[in-house]
Image (cartoon, rainbow, N blue to C red):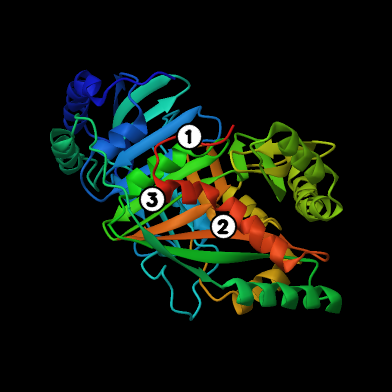
Amino acid sequence: MTSLPTQELTAAVLALKKSVAAAAAQPHPPGRLIRAAAPAAPVSPPDWLAAQSGSTQYYWSDRHGAFEMAGIGEGDAVSPANGPEGWPALFTLLRDRLPAGQSPARYYGGFRFQPRHGRASRWRDFSGYRFVAPLIELHRHRGATTLSANLMADGGGGVRDAAERALAALDRMSLEPAQKPAAPQSHTREDRPDREEWEAMVRRALDAFADGALRKVVLARETRFVTDTALDPVAVLRRLIRNTRHSFCFCFHPAEDRAFLGASPERLFRRAGNLLESEALAGTCGRDPDPAADAALAAGLLSSEKDRREQAMVADALRELFGHWCGTVTMDPEPALLTLLHCRHLLTRISGTLRGPADDAALLAALHPTPAVGGVPRRAALDWIAREEPFDRGLYAAPVGWIAADSAEFCVAIRSGLVKGNTLTVYNGAGIVPGSEPAAEWREIETKMRNFIRVLRHDGTRHGT
């Protein structure tokens, strides 16, 4: 879709200010979000986000480009510090706060992969969950662009304080093109575990298979890049988008000292009304610039007994869960290829019609983590990961996404990274099953990391086909 310069938002800003002022003059249901909105010119949300100053920035786009949101500030934020402990109560609270009716308002956020453990962690500033309705949003949906404000009504039903914050944010909003940040000229790299430790960890997993304790376990690697200059999370995000396709792209930047971002090809689930969708994504091969060699790699993945067995464990788990939740289930009869810029995966799609009332908290608890990021059996694999991996996964491989009044969507936060100052810590994993080769699994993670490597090179071009 063609994008216009950010200066073209001037009319939308003026219209939104009028809408916010009108909302402030009216009473509203206490404790609910009030959404003020104005049509906008087709400005790119990432470009607009990059032009804004301040450290509270959010971004989400779906895999197909039908929906894209960039946000600044926080109209409302819910975390364990001010929200409930359990997932069912959280979903109820957020939906009680969303505007009544068919409003497009959403909360964006996610959960940790597992509860905190005792290891020193780069994730100490991230709570068990956090969901935000940005104060100001620019979003595109099916070709229409909208500038909006999320105003939280106080206990008396007033939104004057929220409206003042929104108007001040609109006054500060920059409509000038973003300045291109200086690119890192060099970086150092540290892997946890390193190559030797990784191969030893994989061999321990193979021993566990032989003992019958596990059938599959997904092991991850934390790769830390330290650059010679501070990293701008939104600049990293924009370069990541250019080096990605067929992926959910996201950035959660709640404070100046931290941001979590990524480009995940894997949907955990989407629910709209009583329609539920998910997918089994596993098995990996690289790409090759030579078309004949690239086609041979694709054919090899489709015929790989090891990769098909690994992917089948995910598909079988989803088939069982959908059979429990849904009356009608449709599933691809055979895995297809999902082709990304730097690698390919085996993909099986599944959808179904829910038998009873939708319960997103129960769906989330049943689906996360799938065998694609945990293992089989689930509990034994998670215990093994917590014991053997030398770091805290934090938000890596966790559910991140959005919650609306009668729908929700979460991706699995793989191909993701944590930005802190001049450090980018990247997380990727590989599914280990009987027959896995430690060196080959190390190389697989190197393949999955290529989009972030391109980001650090910062050559400004789109790579691959």
**Which residue does the numbered mark 3 point to in the structure image?**
252
Q: State the residue at coordinates (62%, 60%).
A: 429
**Which residue does the numbered mark 1 point to in the structure image?**
462
Of the residues shown, which amino acid type is indicated by label 1? Answer: Arg
Q: Is residue 369 visible?
A: no
In space, the residues marked 2 and 3 are separated at their CA atoms by 15 Å
Mark 2 or 3, nearer chain start: 3
Question: Which label lies toward us, 1 or 3?
Answer: 1
**Which residue does the numbered mark 2 point to in the structure image?**
397
Determine the secondary structure under disc 3.
strand
- Residue 65 place in picture, x, y as percent: 50, 29
Label 3: how many Cα within 10 Å (few below 14, some 14–19, many 20+): many
User: The N terminus appears in which quarter of the rendering?
Assistant: top left
Of the residues shown, which amino acid type is indicated by label 3? Answer: Phe
Q: State the residue at coordinates (62%, 44%).
A: 269
Compare residues 359 and 6 and report the one nearer the observer.
6
* Contact, mark 2 vs mark 3 (Cβ under 8 Å): no
- Residue 192 place in picture, x, y as percent: 53, 71
In the displayed structure image, the side of residue 265 where residue 279 appears, left or right: right
In space, the residues marked 1 and 3 are separated at their CA atoms by 23 Å
User: The C terminus appears in which quarter of the rendering?
Assistant: top right
Q: Is residue 2 visible?
A: yes
In the displayed structure image, the side of residue 213 where residue 375 appears, left or right: left
Up-down relation of residue 111 to residue 464 (above or below): below
Mark 1 or 2, nearer chain start: 2
In space, the residues marked 1 and 2 are separated at their CA atoms by 25 Å
Q: Which mark is residue 375?
A: none
- Residue 62 place in picture, x, y as percent: 51, 35
Of the residues shown, which amino acid type is indicated by label 2? Answer: Ala
Compare residues 170 and 287 and report the one nearer the observer.
287
In the displayed structure image, the side of residue 445 where residue 135 appears, left or right: left
- Residue 20 place in picture, x, y as percent: 20, 30
